[in-house]
Image (cartoon, grey):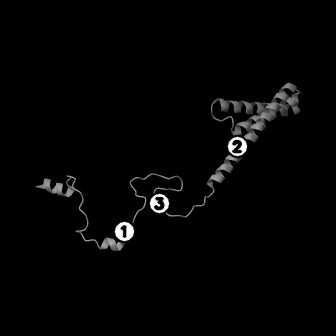
Amino acid sequence: MDTLIGSILGWVGTIGTFSAYVLLWRGRVDSSALHYSLLNAAGGFMAGAGAFAFGAWPAFGSNIVWGAIGVHGVVMALRRKLAASAALTSAAAPHPLVAGPWTPDTTDALPISLPWLPRVIEMETPEAVQTQSPAEIPAPAQTGVTPPAIRERAYAR
């Protein structure tokens, strides 16, 4: 019974480490990925247990070292995930906005250049707009372009 369990553990561990290698070799997984390290750690320890059951001490030693290296990879992958999670939560935290006068050439992130906008925009009051007569409104400059309605009437003749 011990040899059957040892054989099963050895073969499952070997398949686990080989599948991790094949996934890495085919580009399906990154060497710093958590599941790659888990496959190596579990496979190394299972193959080591199988070697232990048969008394194959050199294979036992190498597989236990392989499993320990896999555990180190798991720890490092978990640390990276925790650090990335902490960085995301700190970046996603709301930042207080400072209330102040609005200027169109400044955003909350960076100052921007809008040369067509003046620094101070003076708003006309509704009373000032209503008091202008049509004679006071300046005519647009003559550009030599005929408006479409006049052009259409000229061709209709």
Residue 141 is at least partly visible in this image: yes
At label 3, which amino acid type do we have?
Thr
* Circle on res. 114: none
Dot 1 corresponds to which residue?
Answer: 124
Q: Is residue 82 left or right of residue 1?
A: left
Q: Is residue 143 above or below residue 47?
A: below
Measure the alpha-carbon separation of dots 3 and 2. 42 Å
- Label 2 residue SS: helix
Residue 53: image x %, image y %?
Answer: 87, 31
Res 57 quadrant in image? top right
Q: Which of 74 and 123 is in front in this view?
A: 123
Image label count: 3
Residue 73: image x %, image y %?
Answer: 74, 37
Residue 55: image x %, image y %?
Answer: 89, 27
* Circle on res. 103: 3
Q: In this view, does 145 lie to the left or right of 48?
A: left
Residue 115: image x %, image y %?
Answer: 40, 52
* Circle on res. 80: 2
Residue 56 is at least partly visible in this image: no
Q: Residue placed at 81% from the left, 31% from the top?
A: 65
Q: Is residue 96 left or right of residue 16?
A: left
- Label 3 residue SS: loop
Residues packed near mark 1 inside 10 Å, few (<14), some (14 to 19) or many (20 plus): few
Measure the alpha-carbon separation of dots 2 and 1. 57 Å
Measure the alpha-carbon separation of dots 1 and 3. 17 Å
At label 1, which amino acid type do we have?
Glu
